[in-house]
Amino acid sequence: ASHTSTAHPDIEARTPPYEKLVNKLTTVRKVLGQDRGLTLSEKILYAHLDNVEEALGGRGGDVRGKADLKLKVDRVAMQDASAQMALLQFMTCGLTKTAVPASIHCDHMIVGEKGADVDLPKSIEGNKEVFDFLESAAKRYGIQFWAPGSGIIHQVVLENYSAPGLMMLGTDSHTPNAGGLGAIAIGVGGADAVDALVDAPWELKAPKVLGVNLVGKLSGWASPKDVILTLAGKLTVRGGTGYIIEYFGEGVQSLSCTGMATICNMGAEVGATTSLFPFTESMASYLKATQRGPIAEKARAVQNDYLKADSHAEYDKVITIDLSTLEPHLNGPFTPDLSTPISLFKETVEANNWPTKLHSGLIGSCTNSSYQDMQRCESLVKQASAAGLKPKSEFLITPGSEQIRATLEKEKTLETFEKAGGVVLANACGPCIGQWKRSDIEKGDHNAILTSYNRNFRSRNDANPNTLNFLTSPELVTAMAYAGTTTFNPLTDSIPTPDGKEFKFSPPAGAELPETGFATGNPDFYPTFSEPDPSAPVIISPTSTRLAPLDPFPPYGEGELDLTVLIKIKGKCTTDTISAAGSWLKYKGHLENLSHNTLFTALNAETDEVNVAYDTDGTKMAIPELAHKWKKEGKPWMVVGEYNYGEGSAREHAALQPRYLGARVILCKSFARIHETNLKKQGMIPLTFAEEADYDRIGAGDHVRTEGLYDMLKNGGKGEVVLNVTKQNGETIKLPMKHNISGDQAKFILAGSALNLLSAAAKG
Ligand code: F3S
C-alpha cells in the first residue's frame, strides 16, 4: 500500500515537544524515586507538570488520587457551541494570541434532515452570526478555524492534531477520542480551555489508572466498538470516575488506530477522565496516511521511554478483555451501560417489551465514521444489494469529516450507500446532538433506533422521550437495518429475498486505510490562517441576541461585604437548575439573554414554590427577575443552598450568570467540587456552614455583613470568616463559616476573576 507520506506544511506545530517531555520525565523519575514503574498515563501527565516538586515530591510515590497536578497542555480544541463563551472570556484578557495552538470546529449546530446538500447551507444561514464571530475571532487570535461542513471535532482532531504523547484539552466530553493516537485528551468546560489559552496551568487531581488488558484478536462481526460496549457494561456509567483508562496487552497491536479512537471516545460514558493506548504501528500508519509521517518517526524514537507503560508499572485496577471471544453488543436504551450481547438481544427485547420494529439505523458520527468502519459497512451493503435487498429501516450516514466523506466518494462507497437508499448527512454532529428533524414518526411515538454513536440518554437524538436508542457497531446497525427489526441477529438469522431465497450475511470486511490515500475534498472547509492578525476585527453584531461581548467583572474592592439573601433553596440544585440548557443553548454566547434562566427551576425553601423569590418589600417575583432588579439597583446578593450545590455538568455559565447578576457569595451545606472551583474562578466566594443546622437560621431577605472575609482573602485564604446576619425582624445572629480557598484562588477573587488576574500578569 502506498500511503501518501508528504508531510503537512505546519508539521512542526503539530509535533509534540518530545525532547522536552522526555527530559521532564527524567526529573519526574528523580522526584518520585528511581525504581517506581510508571504507567503510560502517568508518563504523559507528569511530563506536562508545571509543579513537579510540589505535586510529586515527598509523597513516597503516593500520588494517584491525591496530588494536585498543575498541567501545561500542548493544545486546545473547541466546538462551536462551547467555543463562544470560551472566546468571549479569552477576549476580556486583551491578549493578541493564544498561548498554545488551538482550533475551532463548527459541528454542533448543523441540522440533519434531508441530506448534506440541503441541510448545510440552511444551517449556515441560521447560525451565520455565530459562525462569523467564531471565524473572525479565530483570525484575530491565530486559531485554526474549521468551517461548518469540515467535520466533527474529534474526527478532525484525530486526522490533524492528535499525536502520541500529546496532552490536549477539548471543550467537549468526547475529546478522549484522541487517545486512539496515544494522546491524553481531556474534555473540559470553556473556562478550563481559557486557562490553557492564556498559559495558566490547568489543575487536575492526579487520576488513578485503570488498566485494560486486551488479549487475543478481533475477528468476524466483533469490532472495536464492542470492546467499549462490553467495558461500559462492566464498569457502569460511574465506574471510571477519577480514573484514566489505559489499554495494554498483545491485543492492542491488532487494533486499527481509528478503532482505538472509537474505544477511547466512549470511555467518556463510564465517567473516565480520559482513555488512551500505547504507541503502535497502526498509529504510525495512520499518521503517515494523514500527512504526519515525521511525527511517527519521532514517536518511534521515544517509544520505549515515553510512549508505553514501564514493564513494572502497577495499575489501580485491571480488567482483562479477550478480543478473540468478544461478541457484538448493543447498549441501551437510555443509558450506555445497559449492555446486551447480540445472542441475547432478541429475548431481551421481547422480555422488556421494547419495540421490535427498527425505525432508523444511523451510522458514522465522531465515534464510528472511520474509513475502516465505512468499508466494513459497505461490504455488508454490497452483499445485501447483490441479493436484491434494500434496508427496511431508514438508513442515515454521517461522515465524520470532509476527508472521510471525500475519500468515500472517490471510492464510490457513498454511491453504494445511496443506491441502497441511504441518506448521507452533513459532516457534522446532526442527529447525535439532537439536530435531527425526523418525519418518520410523530412526536411521542414509541420507537427503536440503532446508532453507532456514543450516547443514548432519553430524548438526546430527536427530542422524543419515547425513542429507544441502542448503541452498537456500525456493522450491526447496517445489517439490522436490512431486516428492519430489533430481533434480527445477523450472525445467525437470514432475510427472505425478493426471489424467494434466504439471504444470510457473511461477516463484514474492510481495509484499515485507503490504498491510494485519503482525498481532501472541498478546500473551502479547511483552515486558511493560523498566524494571529491583530488588525482583524472580531465580528459581533450590536443587535445580536445570541452573542454579546463580556465585560471583565469588577475587582473585589476593599473591606467587608454587605449582602442580601436573594433566595434560600431547598434540595438539589444542579448546574441545570442554575443555568438550564435545552432551548436556552442558543444564548450560550449572550450572558444577559441567558441570565433570564438563572435558578428558575430552584425550589424556594421557605414557600415550597418553584422559581419564586420575594423582594425585601414582599413583592413576589420570578427568581431571575428579582436578580435583575437587584443588579440594576446595585444591590449585591447571595444564595443559600443545601448539599452538593452545583452538581451535574461542569457548565461554566452556572457560575458566570449569578456573578453577572451581582451575586458575591454562595453559602450552602456542601458544594460539588467543579462548581465550587468555577465559582472562585469567576470571583465569587463559596462558603459552607460550620454548623449545618444554621441553614435553618438564615433566610431570604436577611441582610448579611461578612466579618474576616477581606483579611482571609488578603492572607491567601487563611483566617476565619463569620457572617453577621440581621433578620428582617431586626434580630441579629452570628454564623461561623467554613471555606476552601487557596492562595491562588484568593488572588482570583480579589482581582474579580481568574481571568482578570491572568490577563494582568500576561500583559506584564
Ligand atoms: Fe458529540 Fe458530535 Fe460526537 S455531538 S458525540 S461530538 S458527533
Image (cartoon, helix red, strand yellow):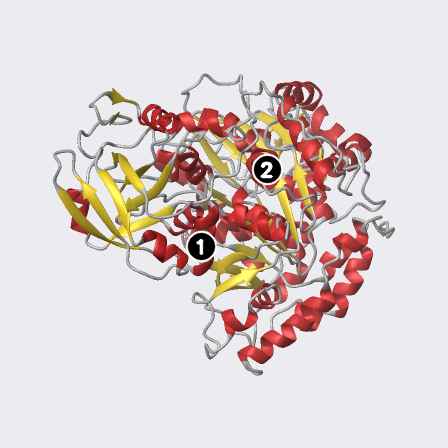
Disc assigned to residue 83: 2
Residue type at tag 1: Gln
- Residue 66 is situated, as x and y percent measured from the top left of the image, at 43, 67
**Front position in the image: 341 or 630:** 630
Tell me which residue sits at (72%, 46%) in the image.
Answer: 159
Give the residue displayed 19% in from the left and 54% down from the top.
691
Q: Nearer the viewer, residue 412 or 460?
A: 460
State the separation of the CA atoms marked 2 and 1: 24 Å
Which of the numbered marks, if any, corresponds to residue 100? none
**Rendered position, 254 above or below 687:** below
Residue 596 x/y as whole percent: 41, 25
Which of the two marks, 2 or 1, is nearer to us in this view? 1
Relative image position of residue 381 (x, y in whole percent): 68, 33
Q: Is residue 180 visible?
A: yes
Q: Which mark is residue 745?
A: 1
The residue at 22%/55% (across/down) is 690
